[in-house]
Image (spheres, grey):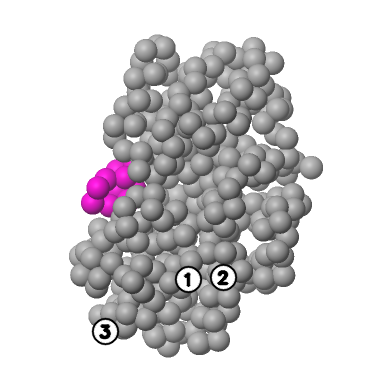
Amino acid sequence: MMQTLEVGLAERSYPIQIGSGLLGNGELLRAYFPQKRAAIVTNTTVAPLYLAKLQQTLQSIGVSSVPVILPDGEVYKTGATLNLIYDALLTHRCERSTPLIALGGGVVGDMTGFAAASYLRGVPFIQIPTTLLAQVDSSVGGKTGINHPLGKNMIGAFYQPRLVLADITTLDTLPDKELSAGLAEVIKYGLIRDLPFLGWLEQNMDRLLAREPSALQYAVLRSCQNKAEVVAADERESGERALLNLGHTFGHAIESGMGYGVWLHGEGVAAGTIMAADLSQRMGWISAQDVTRIRKLFERARLPVTAPDLGMESYLNYMGLDKKVEGGKLRFVLLKQVGEAVIESNVPGELLEQTLEACTHD
């Protein structure tokens, strides 16, 4: 059964469709192609699995498509790869009314969105996420961009899609490691704002790891509901939306410090969330039992709970490049209690150093 959510952004509102077998349903897409032409951006891993299926579906509604197949991996989320998209769009004379479709995970979605925001100063954009992480997080909310050697996602734009189509069936082909990486972002919603969902995850983690479609669909739906509410209230991350970055300040430092792609984004978020929980305990907000509860859930999701030892100076340097830095001060998303996150810029340096020492290993 398909379920529909709305991201409420006035004239830029758009639906999120969640269900099984949606990739074959042309009627869900028909309204978005006035010129009967589209460009599909995907990668070398996803193309053999789902590109032909999507092209067939588009053909069934009279839409021709230009495929753009990128190399796969976070290490390719660069300006050079972005140019491959522009090259294809210009070569095929794609117009301002030609939608770009992102078919893939978070990297494909972020890059396609940034290309859509900037090609001809803005063309329509559709998200068809094929990983759990992209379905529950990166495909919703309009954050687009590329990495820079000095920092993750530092170059980009806020640019909303016209439609998000989350086909649960595509998760069948996801490697176990990628499924777990997506669960890190799912757990995040429970920790920052949805305590009943956190309890549901504790009861149903085994069903999610076994890829039961009904459990996966519920997890995607509930995650997207949380994300859509936050984005509608704070599209450009001037306040509440920053709370979605629980674990990300530490996690992005891990990803940058280890080299893009060595740790998956969700793995960095998992270890980073344990660090944020540890720091929250040191601030006197949550208990040791709370930290243990959080660690256990990430362990059950088969995610790392200890961060690599990059060295104190490296962590501080990478975290200093975080997008939440304001007035030169680090701002952390921490837990006031389990189920409620806050942004804190007055973290004593000695407590941060204690967390970095306690939560890392060689």
Looking at the picture, how far across and down is residue 90, in whole percent? Answer: 36, 15
Q: Secondary structure at mark 2?
A: helix
> Does 225 appear in magenta?
no
Left or right of 305? Residue 312 is left
Residue drawn 57% across and 13% down?
A: 64
Q: Which residues are magenta?
A: 146-157
As rendered, which of 255 and 121 lies closer to the eye?
A: 255
Q: Label 3: which residue? A: 350
Between 177 and 106, which is closer to the camera in this rendering? 177
Residue 57 location (% of width, % of height): 67, 21
Instruction: Give the tally of numbered discs.
Output: 3
| Whether residue 93 is situated above or below residue 330 in the rendered picture | above
Identify the disc placed on residue 267: none
What is the number of the mark on residue 305?
1
Q: Which residue is mark 2?
A: 299
Q: Amino acid at mark 2?
A: Glu
Between discs 1 and 2, the one toward the N terminus: 2
